[in-house]
Amino acid sequence: MPFVRYAKVELLDPSLVGRYVDHLHKIFPHNRFNLKEASKNLLNIKSDDQYLYVIVDGIHWSTYEHPYPNGNGDAFHKDELLKLRNDGRLAYQTWNRKGVFLHHQSDAIGTKDHVGFICDTWPDFDSQSVKMLPALDKAKHEDLCKKVKAGHWKDVSMGCIASSATCNHCNNVATVEAELCDCVKDYKGRIHPSTGKLVFEWNHGIVGKELSFVSIGADTKAKVVEILAEPNYKVTLRNLAHKLMHHKNHLLNSSGVEILKLIDGKMTVQRRKRLVKLLDFVSDYGMI
C-alpha cells in the first residue's frame, strides 16, 4: 500500500490504484519517453499555439550529507530519483505524460480538470532538481496561462507515490500507516523535543503522480524558471534541419531540407506524420 506525497500525505486505497493508473493511461497513454518521443509529442499538438510551454523545478533532491526535506517533512534522495526501474525508465521519468493540475485536484479519480500535461523531465545537477516541461492548455485555461506568463503564478508542487519511507530520527521503515513510528506520527516536519532534531522521512520507490500550480508549495524552491518561445518545437526542428543540411551524408542532407520545408508551412496532419517518419529515420543515425 503506497504512500502518496504532495501538499499532504495519505495512503492510496489499494482498490483505487488500478483505477487510478488506468485513468492516467487513458488521458496520457504514452509513458515511455525520451528526446525523440518528446519531439513527436509536440508534433501531435492540435495547433501551433494551443499550449504554453514552461520549464519548472519540479522537485529538489537531497543527499544524506545535505538533506533538504520539504515543508511537509518529506525528503527525496538523489539516488532514488535517478534509480533505474524494472521497466527501463529512471524514476524521475515516471512524471512524463502525467497531468498538470491546480492545487492537486488530481485526487478525484476520473477528474478531467487537468490544465495540461508534462512533456518531458530531466535532472539538473546545478540546481539539484528534476526539471519538468509542462504544456499548459491556453485555449481552456487562458487565465492561468496569462498569470504564468506575467510571472504572477510561479509556485508548483509535484505529487508522487512512495512505496516506503524511512524516519531520519529512528530509522524505522514504514510501508503502511500502521508501521509509522511515533517520531513521524507526532513530530514529522517539526523539531523533536528530546533531541532538537528535525523529523522527516526519506521516501523510496518513487513514482510520479502529477504536477500542480499552487499558492505555496511544500518545496519552496519549486517554481517556474523559464517561459519557452512558442511554438518551441519549431525552433528545435529548424536547428536540427540546418545541422542535417551541412552533413556529408546525402540522405541526412536531404532530410534536413525536407524538414525545413515542412515546418515553414501550416502544420497539417499529413505534415506531422511525415515529420515523425523523418525523425525516426534521423534517429537511426544517432542525430537525435
Image (cartoon, rainbow, N blue to C red):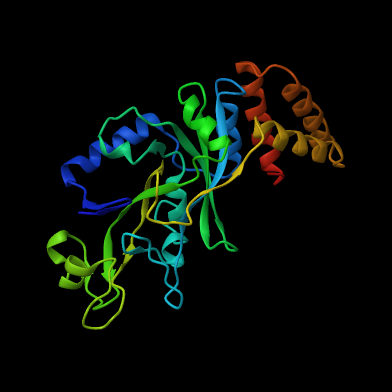
- Identify the residue at image location x=46%, y=66%: 78
User: From where the camera sits, is residue 54 visible?
Assistant: yes
User: From where the camera sits, is residue 89 visible?
Assistant: no
Say how many tags the image has: 0
- Name which quarter of the figure residue 178 lies in: bottom left
Q: Quadrant of the C terminus?
A: top right
Q: Residue 230 in the image: state x and y as whole percent.
A: 65, 31
- Identify the residue at image location x=75%, y=28%: 259
Q: In the drawing, does residue 275 fall left or right of residue 217?
A: right
Q: Residue 16 in the image: state x and y as whole percent.
A: 20, 40
Q: Residue 188 in the image: state x and y as whole percent.
A: 25, 66
Q: Nearer the viewer, residue 174 or 31?
A: 174
Q: In the drawing, does residue 38 fall left or right of residue 245?
A: left
Q: In the drawing, does residue 3 fall left or right of residue 118?
A: left
Q: Residue 161 in the image: state x and y as whole percent.
A: 31, 52
Q: Is residue 254 above or below residue 224?
A: above
- Name which quarter of the figure residue 21 lies in: top left
- Name which quarter of the figure residue 73 lies in: bottom left
Q: Is residue 266 above or below residue 237?
A: above
- Identify the residue at image location x=39%, y=36%: 101
For the view shown, which residue lies furthest in the bottom direction? 195
